[in-house]
């Protein structure tokens, strides 16, 4: 098992990471010297299959979840409503008409879920704190019973030697704040900072690592531009405004964290989608540059370079909404130094000459996800090359069950392949000098997959949603072996 370590212990330098590499794949410490250019990217599929790949000592092997997707118990102990409760109540929003009302009932089963993690030798658990549990009205009155749940959870993790990685916001805005304009209201940045401060004072003495906001991009795109997620709006200008307010909220939470007595580290959680051209045309190359802005640099640049990218080529309404929201001094707040960058990676973005998304690689049951492990390598090494090499934690990576994995639902060989290929990409990025300190598989449990309801199952552990019984899949046992040995076994 990878033992929970203190923040200082896992703050290895890039050089230490490289020197710690032991591999039978022929990668040497010499390739890891700071400032070395990365080796040319191998073509997709050219991963080093068949070798045993060791990871640096102290590497965090984790799993990830989020509050609304697993907790259920939406009215227990004084929890307030969130925008997802409201969204699910709207007819036609969720594929199977379900909601997170019961989900995995983790709120009541957290102890056995933590025991399960321990059995699986998981070293780091990424979970999120439900803002409406702690502040039912979004601000003001603290609901002690809601806070106590997370207090017990953190203690339970530490007692089992699992390092807590807490996300402050994973999409469940209190409905009371949505009623005041939600993330479109500039005050939202301050509401978030106030909420974060409550959490830091309660848990800051024990949580190792914090994430501010999960995937601002998905909130803006799916929640405000395309309407597929809460709050279900289709207004590009509002989406632009929301991007800036989410970035500002992140920055303000960082300064509250620095002013608090918290002992851990903090960083953002960005969903990155490296962009590629579907063909050799100049049109496709230009479309890639534009897609890269909306997929990646609208978030990376303000947070890590204190500036927005050139907005002249992106959707005009989106750019206008964003530009109108920016006030003097904001970028200094937004660009406050972070301790690490959390990266969620699922899929590349491939575009044609018209800027339309193209499916060039195998598509998973999620529909939107193409399997391209090289994309993870490209995202990780880009952060090193272009953003001054911050420490990176992979905070999500995973795949839904493959319907062609027939037979028992727990025989998920496609997931094992997916994890292996992506971990090979991570290994390669580390060997070339990228400071990556952990990996979190999405997800521990099958859970409420937003607009897909329970129709997509992303867990290493199967959940029977009738009985709520948990059954580890083949991938859980494979991942457990990886976590225990700190290496990828040969195939
Ligand atoms: C996200 C969210 C998760 C999803 C997962 C699978 O990245 O979209 O963080 O909550 O469930 O990504 O789609």
Image (tube, rainbow, N blue to C red):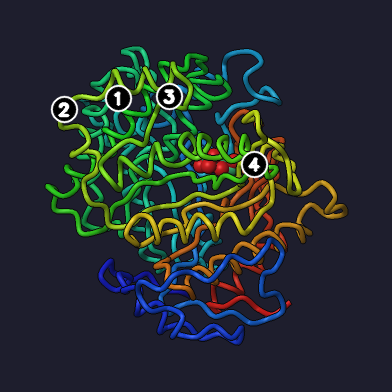
User: Mark 2 sits on what residue?
Assistant: 328
Q: CA distance from mark 3 to mark 4?
A: 34 Å
Q: Earlier in the sequence, mark 1 or mark 4?
A: 1
Q: Earlier in the sequence, mark 4 or mark 2?
A: 2
Of tags 2 and 1, the one toward the viewer is: 2
At which x and y percent is residue 397?
56, 53
**Residue at x 77%, y 61% (from the top left corner):** 413
User: Mark 3 sits on what residue?
Assistant: 82
User: Mark 4 sits on what residue?
Assistant: 350
Q: CA distance from mark 4 to mark 2?
A: 36 Å
User: Mark 1 sits on what residue?
Assistant: 138
Some atom of ligand 1 lies within 8 Å of the CB belonging to the residue at label 1: no
Q: Is residue 63 left or right of residue 302?
A: right
Crowd tier of the residue under label 3, counting other residues whose Cα lies within 10 Å: few below 14, some 14–19, many 20 or above: many
Secondary structure at numbered mark 4: strand
Q: Earlier in the sequence, mark 2 or mark 1?
A: 1
Of tags 3 and 2, the one toward the viewer is: 2
Secondary structure at numbered mark 1: loop
């Amino acid at each position: 098992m990878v033992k929970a370590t203190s923040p200082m212990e896992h703050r290895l330098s890039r050089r230490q990471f490289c020197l710690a590499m032991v591999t039978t794949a022929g990668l040497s410490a010499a390739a890891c010297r700071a400032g070395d250019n990365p080796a040319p990217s191998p073509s997709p599929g050219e991963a080093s299959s068949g070798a045993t790949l060791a990871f640096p000592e102290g590497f965090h092997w984790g799993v990830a979840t989020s509050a609304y997707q697993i907790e259920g118990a939406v009215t227990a102990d004084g929890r307030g409503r969130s925008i997802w409760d409201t969204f699910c109540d709207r007819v036609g929003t969720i594929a199977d008409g379900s909601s997170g009302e019961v989900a995995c009932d983790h709120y009541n089963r957290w102890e056995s879920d933590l025991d399960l993690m321990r059995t699986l030798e998981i070293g780091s658990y990424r979970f999120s704190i439900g803002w409406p549990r702690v502040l039912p009205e979004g601000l003001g009155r603290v609901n002690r019973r809601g806070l106590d749940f997370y207090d017990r959870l953190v203690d339970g993790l530490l007692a089992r030697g699992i390092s807590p990685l807490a996300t402050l916001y994973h999409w469940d805005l209190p409905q009371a704040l949505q009623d005041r304009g939600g993330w479109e209201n500039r005050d939202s940045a301050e509401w978030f900072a106030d909420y974060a401060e409550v959490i830091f004072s309660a848990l800051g003495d024990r949580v190792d690592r914090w994430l501010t906001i999960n995937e601002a991009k998905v909130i803006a795109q799916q929640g405000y531009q395309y309407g597929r997620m809460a709050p279900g709006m289709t207004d590009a200008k509002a989406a632009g405004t929301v991007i800036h307010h989410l970035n500002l909220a992140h920055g303000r939470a960082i300064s509250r964290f620095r002013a608090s007595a918290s002992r851990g580290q903090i960083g953002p959680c960005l969903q990155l989608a490296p962009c590629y051209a579907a063909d050799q045309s100049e049109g496709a190359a230009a479309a890639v540059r534009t897609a890269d802005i909306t997929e990646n640099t609208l978030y990376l640049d303000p947070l890590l370079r204190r500036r927005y990218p050139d907005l002249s080529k992106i959707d005009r309404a989106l750019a206008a909404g964003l530009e109108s929201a920016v006030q003097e001094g904001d970028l200094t707040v937004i660009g406050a130094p972070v301790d690490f960058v959390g990266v969620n990676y699922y899929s590349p973005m491939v575009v044609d000459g018209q800027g339309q998304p193209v499916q060039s690689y195998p598509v998973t049951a999620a529909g939107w996800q193409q399997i391209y492990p090289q994309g993870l390598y490209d995202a990780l090494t880009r952060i090193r090359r272009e953003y001054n090499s911050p420490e990176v934690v992979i905070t999500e990576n995973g795949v839904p069950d493959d319907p062609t994995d027939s037979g028992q639902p727990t025989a998920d060989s496609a997931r094992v392949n997916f994890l292996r290929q992506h971990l090979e990409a991570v290994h390669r990025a580390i060997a070339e000098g990228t400071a990556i300190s952990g990996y979190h598989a999405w997800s521990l449990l099958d859970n409420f997959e937003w607009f897909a309801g329970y129709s997509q199952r992303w867990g290493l552990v199967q959940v029977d949603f009738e009985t709520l019984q948990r059954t580890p899949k083949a991938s859980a046992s494979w991942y457990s072996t990886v976590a225990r040995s700190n290496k990828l076994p040969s195939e």
